[in-house]
Amino acid sequence: MTHKTLFDLPTPSLVLDRAKLARNIRRMALACARNGVALRPHLKTAKSIDVARMVLDDQTPGIAVSTLCEAEYFAGEGLRDIQYAVCITPDKLERVAAIQTTGARLALITDNAEVARAIADAQDRIDTRFRVQIEIDCGENRTGVLPGSDQLIEIARILDAAPNIDFDGVMTHAGHSYGCRSLTEIETLAEAERLAAVTAAEAVRALGIDCNTVSLGSTPTALHARNLDGITEARAGVYMFGDMFQAQIGSCMVDDLAVSVLTEVSSHRTDLNHLTVDAGALAMSKDRSTEAVPNDVGFGLVRDARGRSIAPQMIVKRVYQEHGLVPMPEGQRLEDYPVGDRLRIFPNHVCMTAAMYDRYHVVDSASGNGTDIVAVWPRANGW
Ligand SMILES: Cc1ncc(COP(=O)(O)O)c(C=O)c1O
């Protein structure tokens, strides 16, 4: 069945505002252009070829992905340069080789000498050339080797010596920028991210090994970096949609958020002055990242069906598997939101929320009333 507007869609459904998406894409493109660096959009959040088509231009070197499922999907859609930006494990190499038979070229990442050797050893059984980058830890303390470490040198030598490997360079990710609470902090961290990548690249070059790619990025640092000298490309992903957490750490405004969950009021408890909606933990995720920022919005900010503000404290306070509980804030009355009323919830962490849905229902707030469904775009979920 084809649904025409947000008022005849089943709920919960994932809604994407194309006009806001376009604006967010422009903003990041301008930020990267200002620093003279290419943007490699990370499609881990969007997982959609339709979004990719909006974000890719002739300056874009390629895309980044976080699963091989995404790599297969985008390769199948004809994209050719795909960085798989999660440490590769040797059991996935056959799948990588199969993807490369489509004509796509993956860039793999590792921070581990044993894995580097396993990729080199795969030449006996896998007939493909692997392009590999070394992941550098710029302070996130998740994965990566330190920029001046012996491990970096050891891995670079193994990769460079292997006949079946094209050593491609270094990459880092300042995921800890999500802990920054001011622009100055983000700018400082962006410089630390840049220095880590450039220092690592120089250490590799000092061995006489080419280091073509020097890649970094997260949405906050890519948007706010003041200098990206020595960097060949920035990766960022969540900026395309934005979310309630990003809005509070300075990546966007709440009015920029492009993705929300359409929900319906399912019950009233007049004695407790709350309503429930049919979007609970599965529809929103249990991400509580806004607990750490000034304006905690529980499990998401509730707005009207057109995405317009109701009240800053109109939030999903508690979730159960299929229920979201919305207490009435000061000035709001339950009777104004009857059972069957439609609302939109803006999530804390859009990557987590979107992962439960297999498609976007696309609206366009810049044309008409913003509730007509102008397209349905599939997503590539899973691993
Ligand atoms: C390795 C890597 N690069 C880039 C990104 C993109 O960061 P953001 O979603 O903040 O744009 C991520 C996000 O998790 C990542 O893991």
Image (spheres, grey):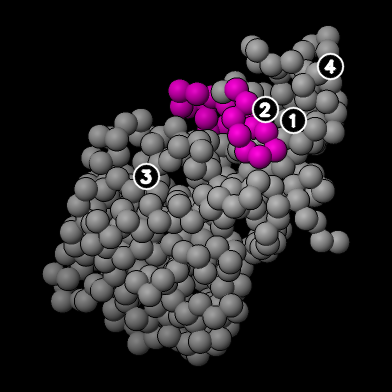
Quick check: is the Cβ at mark 3 less than 8 Å away from ligand 1? Answer: yes
Looking at the rendering, in which quadrant would you find the C terminus? bottom right
Judged by depth in the image, the label closer to the viewer, 1 or 4, is 4
Tell me if label 1 and label 2 are in contact, CB under 8 Å.
yes
Q: CA distance from mark 4 to mark 2?
A: 15 Å
Q: Residue visible at 75% across and 51% down? A: 5
Give left or right: position of 32 versus 347: left
Task: Give the mark, 1 or 3, whose residue is nearer the N terminus.
Answer: 3
Query: For residue 316, which numbered disc appears in the image?
Result: 2
**Which amino acid, by three-letter code, is at mark 4?**
Arg
Residue designated by label 1: 324
Query: For residue 220, which numbered disc appears in the image?
Result: 3
* Residue 299 part of the magenta segment: yes
Residue designated by label 4: 269
Q: CA distance from mark 1 to mark 4?
A: 13 Å
**Which amino acid, by three-letter code, is at mark 2?**
Val
Q: CA distance from mark 4 to mark 3?
A: 40 Å
Give left or right: position of 45 versus 40: right
Task: Give the mark, 4 or 3, whose residue is nearer the N terminus.
Answer: 3
Horizontal and vertical percent position of residue 17: 59, 51
